Structure formats: C-alpha cells, structure tokens
Amino acid sequence: MSFQHPTSNTQYPQPRHVAIIMDGNGRWAQARGLPRTAGHHQGVETCKRVVEAAKELEIPYITLFGFSSENWSRPADEVNELMRLLRMYLRAETAELHRAGVKLQVIGSRAELSEDIVKLIENAENLTKDNADLVLTIALNYGGRHEILKAAEGFAKECLEKGLIPDFGAAEELFPGHLMTTDLPDPDIMIRTSGEQRISNFLLWQCAYTEFIFTDTLWPDFGKADLEVALSEYETRDRRFGAVSRG
C-alpha cells in the first residue's frame, strides 16, 4: 500500500470518510446542573443518532474518537462510567448494527481494557465483519503518536525479516500497512464539537490533507442537521493536496 495523494476534490464531491472528535459531554451536563456522567450517557445516544445519519447520507466510513489513551487520567468514577457505557453500547447495539449492515471495528490498544470489554469488541467485530453499508470505526484507548511509533516498529521488523533497507521507497510501500487504519481511506473531514480547535492526538498520520471543521455545538446536541452543515462546508473547500488551485 502506498501513500494516498488524491488530486482533486471533484473526485469526491461528498466525503467518503468522516472522523469526529466527540467533545463537550461534561460541559453539556454541567450547564444543566447534572453530573458529567449524565453528559456521557447522552453522548452515547448521540453516537447512535450520528451513525444512523451517516448511513442515511450514504457516507461509507465514519470514525469516532471514543476514548483516548490520555483519558485514563480522568477521575476514576468518570472512567468507570465511561467503561460501563461502552459495555452497554456494545451489548445493546451490536445486533442492531449488524441488522443495519454496519461493520464495526475498534482501533487502539486493548491491553488496558478489561477482559469482558475486549470479548464484547471481538464479538461485535466478528459478527459484523462482512457488512458493507457503512464502516463504523471507534477509537478506544487510542493515541496518534503511539500508533505511529508502533507502525514504525512494525515496519522496521518487516524490513529486517525481508532483508530490506528501510529507506523512503520501502517506507512509502510498506509503512501504511502497519497503521491501525490500514483498511480505511484517509479522513476527508475531521469534525470536532464543543468549540475546541485542536485534534488531540487523533489520526495524526491520516489527517495530512484532511479538512478540519470545528463547531460550537456540544456533542450531546449534535445531530443529522449538524452533520449536513459540515458536509455543506466541505463542498466549499478547495482541496489541492499541495497543488495549485484550479479556481
């Protein structure tokens, strides 16, 4: 697999791959005098709504940043609630996703996740692996820098095993195959909710030419209309990928 360098936005008038940093659950709850965990609970409902909207809008790939490798530093009660909600989502939604033709896959390190969660993930992935209507990727215990380092490690080992010189040519051909997203196109759009304007160590390699869209809408309030606004914004962008604008 070689590096991806699309040449024209007109090739993809609608994005194939939308990635979302789901931010603002805590602020949504605090604004209503509720505990932060209530915001996370509502955020799960938003996940369901947005996946359904993506399918209706015929977006073939959507990736949600569910839990970063840095999120373990949050208060234990909040982390425990997030893990409980993850269990609840996987148990309740796996069969529904399968019926809807959605393929579910999870990226990120599973070493720190509990055994029962890992089994739920594996069950969901196995059940839905042949579905093709929409590919839903959830990033759990994920960090972009860690992914790149692990990919570099895998690339170096492959070169040693094959007796290759790890030069640019070999890297261009082999390195992307060691990323966690090797079967996904690079994101066309990265959406972050809640007004924050940073990517927080998410898909660092993959977002080299991604269009970033930041919205003040808090994640629990995000819906199909907000997604459609992002798609409309994307259509106005001139994606040059380092070339000169044709306009």
Image (spheres, rainbow, N blue to C red):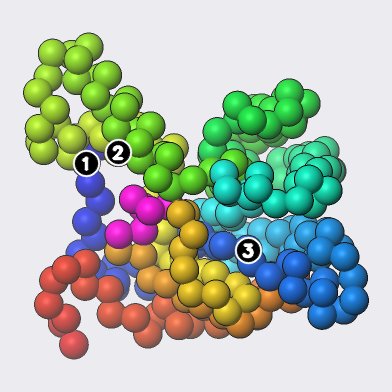
Q: Position of residue 23 (x, y in %)?
A: 64, 66
| Residue appearing at x 58%, y 54% in the figure | 65
- The amino acid pointed to by label 2 is Pro
| Residue appearing at x 21%, y 72% in the figure | 240
SS for tag 2?
A: helix
SS for tag 1?
A: loop
Residue 182, placed above or below residue 114: below
Please provide the residue range marked out in magenta: 203-208
Residue picked out by circle 2? 176
Position of 148 with respect to 143 (left or right) is left
- The amino acid pointed to by label 3 is Met
| Main secondary structure found in the magenta portion | loop
Q: How many numbered circles does the render carry?
A: 3
- CA gap, disc 1 and disc 3: 30 Å
- The amino acid pointed to by label 1 is Ser
Mark 1, Cα crowd under 10 Å, few <14 / some 14-19 / many 20+, is few
Position of 165 with respect to 98 (left or right) is left
Q: Position of residue 120 (x, y in %)?
A: 74, 30
Residue picked out by circle 3? 22
SS for tag 3?
A: loop
Residue picked out by circle 1? 2
Q: Position of residue 244 (x, y in %)?
A: 12, 77
Whether tag 1 and tag 3 are in contact, CB under 8 A, the answer is no
